[in-house]
Amino acid sequence: MGLFGISGIRGVANRDLSPEMALQIGKAVGRTFGGRIALATDPRDSADMFRSALSAGIMSVGSDIVDLGVLPTPALQYYVKTHDDVTGGVSITASHNAPEYNGFKLIHADGMEATREDDKAIENFCARDIETVDPWETGGYSRADGIEDYVNAVISHVDSEAIAKAGLTVVVDCANGATCPTTPLLLRKLKVRAITINGDPQGESPGRPIEPTEESLFNLIGMTTIVGADLGAAHDGDGDRTVFISEKGGFIQGDKSLALMAKVMLEERKGKVITPISSSSIVEDIVTANGGILKYTAVGSHTVVHKMVENKAIFGGEENGGMVFPEMQYCRDGAMTLAKMLECIAKNGPISKQIESFDTYHTVKLRVVCPDARKAELLDHFMQGVEDETSVSTIDGLKIMFDDGWVLLRPSTTEDYFRIYSESKDGRIAEERAEKYMVEAEAFLSGRIST
Ligand code: MG
């Protein structure tokens, strides 16, 4: 396994990820991007340490730093995209991981997240001895504000008049993360009555686990219900994702909010919608019913974004609350997702009403421990078991479509697991099918059955 996972470099600070490594990564990033590089962090305790080490590395090879302070990753991406003198960016964040983690997400000059190949190139670069520049050529350090322009840009991409007129109340949970300086300001400017929880940026003990799940959001769910809000919204740590609570206090599965947003976008303009192969069939159902074309990709946000560019897609996203609005920018954008959902409620009414006609699919996600060396073998075993008449996709792992659901058999690219996803409108079928493949995977890996 390399230094870079599916979404940049991550690890526990001072255990897996040291300041010495950050210094070396800084040198590699500085040599690769050159010129002026923008940095932002989330409020983790190790943020300043990594910012200092990374900056020293970047400046030691002659590149300049523009430091944006605590800022969501999409706001950094917007800054990089809109400043021609900036050659790239680094978001110092571990996104949804626990507070002891940290990491680096690399951003290209066009504001897009670096691909796995780009990460690989930096990783290979890091293994070398990287030469520093002469004493009079070291880089400079300056600060800038990335908050105001980003928030205003989000507002310019929604019908702010309709939102203001609707007199909406929203409870927002910032996870004490990078969205603390941006989302409350956005809501204030949109003239929404906003109640913020976990709204002060702090690293050591955020008020909830940083990954926004139904279990971790019980305070938000309670508050949304108590104040009779029109919407509850929660970000992950670095603000590229948003998940929603309905006005009735119900947690909305990410697939359903993604499907709803796809519907809204298709009502504005017909075209292609991109989502990973692991997304629920509800997304395809809604996209097709609304005159759109759904295209699947491998799992991973940068894959979704690059496929969107390639297909000139009108919208794309993942089931975890990460949505991409190309008019704003080609990256997952939590503030944009929230603003667009507010516009949707202002124009079309309560969110629970808008999704009540959506079919409910049951998804079961299992995983079996599988070393890297055996992943291809296991996948091959499953491939050979496919019957001729079954419909399959090999975009990422193996997806087998049945009349009453599907199963996705997929080796993890970052961990020693083989993942088994199963979906059906009938929960019992989804469960039994997942179980069947799980048993088969375990039997194959233990040598009890062979191909
Ligand atoms: Mg994130």
Image (cartoon, rainbow, N blue to C red):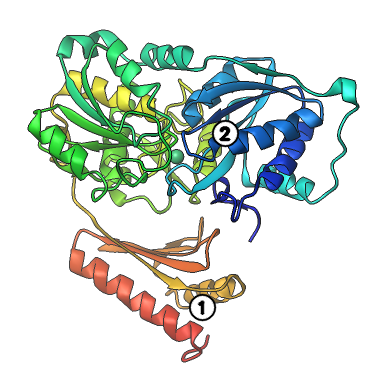
Q: Which residue is mark 2?
A: 48
Q: Residues within 10 Å of mark 2 (few under 14, many from 20)?
A: some
Q: Is residue 340 above or below residue 247?
A: above
The reply to whether residue 347 is in sight is no
Return the disc, 2 or 1, that comes first in the chain's sequence: 2
Residue at the bottom extreme of this rendering: 448
View extreme (right): residue: 134
Quarter of the displayed picture in which ligand 1 can be seen: top left
Relative side of 436 to 251, left or right: right
Which percent across, then down, holds residue 229?
Answer: 13, 27
In the image, residue 130 sits, relative to residue 375, either above or below, namely above
Q: Judging from the image, what secondary structure is the residue with disc 2 in?
A: helix
Q: Secondary structure at mark 1?
A: helix
Task: Give the camera-side residue of 386 and 26.
Answer: 26
Residue drawn at x 60%, y 22% as measured from the top left: 67
Callout 1 crowding tier (Cα within 10 Å): few <14, some 14–19, many ≥20: some
- What residue sits 74% from the left and 43% below the top? 24
Quadrant of residue 314 in the image? top left
Q: Residue at x 81, y 26 (%)?
A: 62
Whether residue 153 is visible, yes or no, is yes
Q: Read off the residue under disc 1.
A: 381
The x, y position of residue 339, in whole percent, is: 31, 22
Q: Is mark 2 within 8 Å of ligand 1?
A: no
Q: Amino acid at mark 1?
A: His
